Amino acid sequence: MIGAPGTAPAIGVIGAGAWGTALAQMLASDGRPVALWAREESLVATINHERRNPTYLPGAELAETITATTDLATMATLPVLLWVTPAQFLGQVLSGLPDYAGDLVLCAKGIEAGSGRLMAEVAHAAAPAAHVAVLSGPTFAHEVAAGLPTAVTLACSGGETQWQRLAPAVARPTFRPYYSADVIGAEIGGAVKNVLAIACGVVDGLGLGQNARAALISRGFAEMQRFGLAMGAQAETLAGLSGLGDLVLTCSSASSRNFSLGKALGEGQSASEALSGRNTVAEGAYTAPVLADLARQKEIAMPLVDAVVTLVRGQAPARDVVASLLARPLRAERPLG
């Protein structure tokens, strides 16, 4: 049973990592009850009894109206679920709720390895009756949990009708969603920026300077645009919060899991060393190979993404990969070139 009689939550969060816990904290900031699902019973007990999540969001004192549970079936009774499990586990966990017919807001960013499907495609296959939306944008979990001002894209497959249901459920005084009907664009922005953030981390780890990082962000954005437009995304979505906005944030701070992974690679750690021993998932490491494969199939040039694949597969040291990029033939700068 989630919540006491008369206080049953209308919204739940699936996944109690840093981002899921931060979203639950934000949603509970005005006193509304929120259900938070986690797989680990020990974590559920800690959240419910100590009001903290020391593993994934240390330092945050969690609201009393957050109720954690391991009972996935109970979560299915809620009309709105924010799904925040890592991208590669979305289908596996969601298969436990095949008949869910409420609003399913996808908050994980990535492309499914093996299938090449975006998260909305995975969700539609696992829970075909659900009304899918995507929440994406420039968000660090610890800032959202602390109530610092944040703006995101909320892309709704059900159009404005779904938006009218979801906006009041998700918006809070310091958490502002902006409407979009471009689910594909919101998903691609979030997936591609994770890969590019690894590249920016490498630049930082190698000490290549701010000029190099700015160049990488702008050229990376060109790659995001090329791929996104080929996949049916809208240019304005890619230039908005869930595309360029998220790219700038994630490529500029070690608070990003993907940036910190790239920095470790740039500092000389092997891919296996950099990926091991992490409590959190750097989604870009899993997205990069499948993104590169999709780009090749569509004959889209994404040299920065290819470089990240080389790095996460341990095929060459960071300095050699950067040298290879700098040795590419000189050419004109085109808007999407």
Image (tube, rainbow, N blue to C red):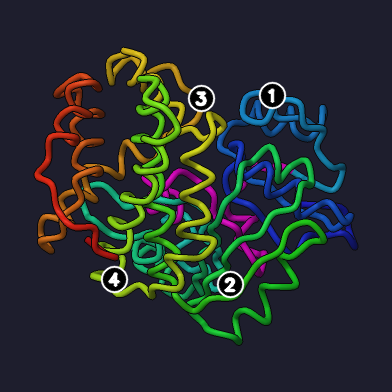
Residue 316 in the image: state x and y as whole percent. 16, 22
Residue 257 in the image: state x and y as whole percent. 48, 32
Mark 4, residue position: 229
Mark 1, residue position: 54
Q: Any magenta on residue 186? A: no
Q: Mark 4 and mark 2 in contact (Cβ < 8 Å)?
A: no
Q: Which element type, helix, strand or loop, lies under badge 4?
A: helix
Q: Mark 1 and mark 3 in contact (Cβ < 8 Å)?
A: no
Mark 2, residue position: 102
Q: Is residue 117 left or right of residue 17?
A: left
Q: Residue at x 70, y 41 (%)?
A: 143
Question: In front here: 217 or 224?
Answer: 217
Q: Which element type, helix, strand or loop, lies under badge 3?
A: loop
Residue 269 in the image: state x and y as whole percent. 32, 13
Bounds of the magenta segment: 68-94
Numbered tag placed on residue 23 in the rendering: none
Q: Nearer the viewer, mark 2 or mark 1?
A: 1
